[in-house]
Image: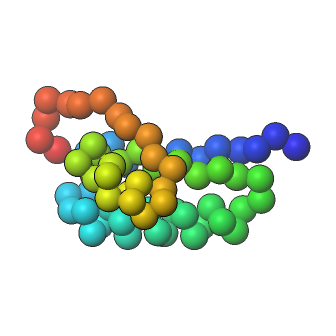
């Protein structure tokens, strides 16, 4: 069976590092209950380092000219 991939693309949300880590923990726990699933999170760039330090498999996204 092929491995499935879930990517949580947070776009320009959340507004704090703490919120980002909370979302990561929620999605990670949910993905752990699923079989044959790899989980990747794509946060705003400013939170990328925080998630990688927590052991997340992370992806980067491009920038956008709007504030929100």
Taking the image as shown, residue 67 lies to the left or right of residue 33, namely left
- Quadrant into which the N terminus falls: top right
- Indicate the position of residue 9 as horizontal and vertical percent values: 42, 44
Taking the image as shown, residue 36 lies to the left or right of residue 10, namely right
Tell me the residue at 65%/50% (across/down).
38
- Quadrant into which the C terminus falls: top left
Furthest residue toward front: 53
Q: Nearer the viewer, residue 47 or 6?
A: 47
- Indicate the position of residue 6 as horizontal and vertical percent values: 59, 47
Taking the image as shown, residue 55 lies to the left or right of residue 53, namely right
**Residue 32, placed above or below residue 51:** below
Tell me the residue at 14%/29% (across/down).
65
Residue 8 in sight here: no
Tell me the residue at 41%/45% (across/down).
42
Rendered image coloring scheme:
rainbow
The image quadrant that residue 31 belongs to is bottom right
Q: Nearer the viewer, residue 54 or 63?
A: 54
**Residue 66, placed above or below residue 56:** above
Residue 2 in sight here: yes
- Indicate the position of residue 40 as horizontal and vertical percent values: 53, 48
Tell me the residue at 35%/34% (across/down).
61
Furthest residue toward right: 1
The image quadrant that residue 21 belongs to is bottom left
Q: Nearer the viewer, residue 41 or 51?
A: 51
Badge count:
0
- Indicate the position of residue 41 as horizontal and vertical percent values: 46, 49
């Amino acid at each position: 069976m092929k491995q499935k991939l879930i990517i949580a693309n947070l776009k320009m949300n959340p507004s704090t590092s703490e919120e980002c880590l909370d979302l990561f923990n929620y999605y990670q726990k949910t993905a752990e209950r699923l079989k044959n699933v790899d989980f990747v999170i794509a946060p705003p760039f400013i939170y990328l380092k925080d998630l990688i330090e927590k052991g997340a498999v992370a992806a980067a996204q491009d920038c956008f000219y709007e504030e929100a």
